[in-house]
Amino acid sequence: MNVDDMVLVSIDDHVVEPPDMFTNHVPAGLADQAPHVETDESGVDRWIYQGRVTGVSGLNAVVSWPPEEWAKDPAGFAEMRPAVYDIHDRVRDMDRNGILASMCFPTFAGFSAGHLNHFKDPLTVVMIQAYNDWHIDDWCGTYPGRFIPLALLPTWDPQLMVDEIRRVAAKGARAVTMPELPHLEGLPSYHDLAYWGPVFEALSDTGTVMCLHIGTGFGALRLAPDGPIDNLIILACQISSLAVQDLLWGPAMRNYPGLKFAFSEGGIGWIPFYLDRCDRHYTNQKWLRRDFGGRLPSEVFREHSLACYVTDPTSLKLRREIGIDNIAWECDYPHADSIWPDAPEFVLNELNGAGATDEEINKITWENACRFFNWDPFAEIPRERATVGARRAIATDVDTAIRSRKEWARLYAEKHPG
């Protein structure tokens, strides 16, 4: 395949939310209680909600920084590449990278709204709704056809979740982001149908995908306290298999035929061993039999799942064993793992190295994701304008220079004097 003929849909990117995101979406009487950004004495921009620091950016916003500056250190908006938080610049960066469409997970709110859901009260319901309205109407709605809308949920109450699922689905959301292992957050596990059953039914009824992004389940990794941060970053992907175990061997995948799960940023390398182990266990340990409806666990997994990867050169060679219809690519912009501005070349080289056919390349780079999320990639932008070559042709002037945090801050000060 010629790189310019590819179509790229990234099923996992991130938005660092702009400070004014709540301005037009919170009732006037509650505006002073909305999450807001405060700059501390060190010049770091921090989101504050109900008196609590809810999130900073740090390692989440390192794109176009020199790699030696990447760290968990928090950052101010001035230090970031503007496309991290500005929708107009983001679309330009997507074009420069040849990417047609993107799904953007939250930053300050937490991947499954955990930073907001710390407060289980009516005010937080309003703020979650406001977040979703901003994301669907402003972030995604400003450029139709460029983003797949994703929503947050108030996970502490099943009825509130059901209500919000139905509300955001009617607004065009195709997915919600949920905890990998809710029992680590003090919630019932996904085995508890009295709690999660109505939520699973609402997701199935609306065709809304349940996304489980790595990171919310870090508490499952009881790592050496004196180990390096490398341990956490490298092993984070293993949590996806723990999440699948509760969903596959619990009631979710076995009892709800229309329920769909996307395992975001978990990679695909864990899947071949995990499915082999599941099928062996199921056929061998008959005294522990679960009811998979006359099918193997691996078959049920493939009916319900989309596995998302950034780079997985070895595992792509097992793409057919994993399930060629169950794999989708992601860019992870603007995180440290993101591939920008040369994603098309990187992705094609990796797929060619695995011996993928043109048909398989199309499945992995856009078809599987668009089918799974029931999202038409060409509804707003015709196919001939959706390719890597077409998107890049209108973004040749996008600056891709590597700049230090200080240099970005200097440019920001020039653009925003005073």
Image (cartoon, rainbow, N blue to C red):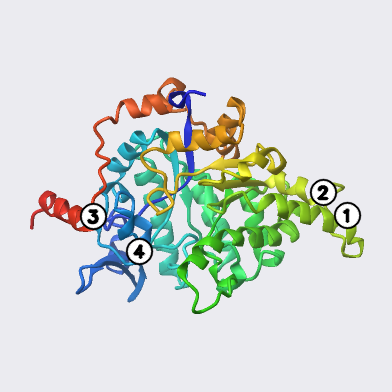
Q: Earlier in the sequence, mark 1 or mark 4?
A: 4
Label 2 with label 1: CB-CB less than 8 Å: yes
Q: Amino acid type of disc 2?
A: Leu
Quote the CA–CA distance across marks 1 and 3. 56 Å
Position of the C terminus, as image quadrant, is: bottom left
Determine which residue is flagged by label 1: 283
Q: Earlier in the sequence, mark 4 or mark 2?
A: 4
How crowded is the residue under tag 2: few (<14 C-alpha within 10 Å), some, or many (20+)?
some
How crowded is the residue under tag 3: few (<14 C-alpha within 10 Å), some, or many (20+)?
some
Q: Earlier in the sequence, mark 3 or mark 4?
A: 4
Determine which residue is flagged by label 4: 71
Q: Amino acid type of disc 3?
A: Ser
- Please give left or right for residue 192 compared with residue 395 in the image: right
Residue at image position (25%, 43%) is 401
The image quadrant of residue 131 is bottom left
Front position in the image: 81 or 115: 81
Quote the CA–CA distance across marks 4 and 2. 43 Å
- Please give left or right for residue 415 compared with residue 245 in the image: left
Measured from the top left, where is residue 177 in percent x and y?
52, 55
Q: Which SS class for mark 2? A: loop
Label 4 with label 2: CB-CB less than 8 Å: no
Quote the CA–CA distance across marks 2 and 3. 52 Å
Measured from the top left, where is residue 79 in percent x and y?
23, 57
Quote the CA–CA distance across marks 3 and 4. 13 Å
In the image, which is nearer the foreground, mark 2 or mark 3?
3
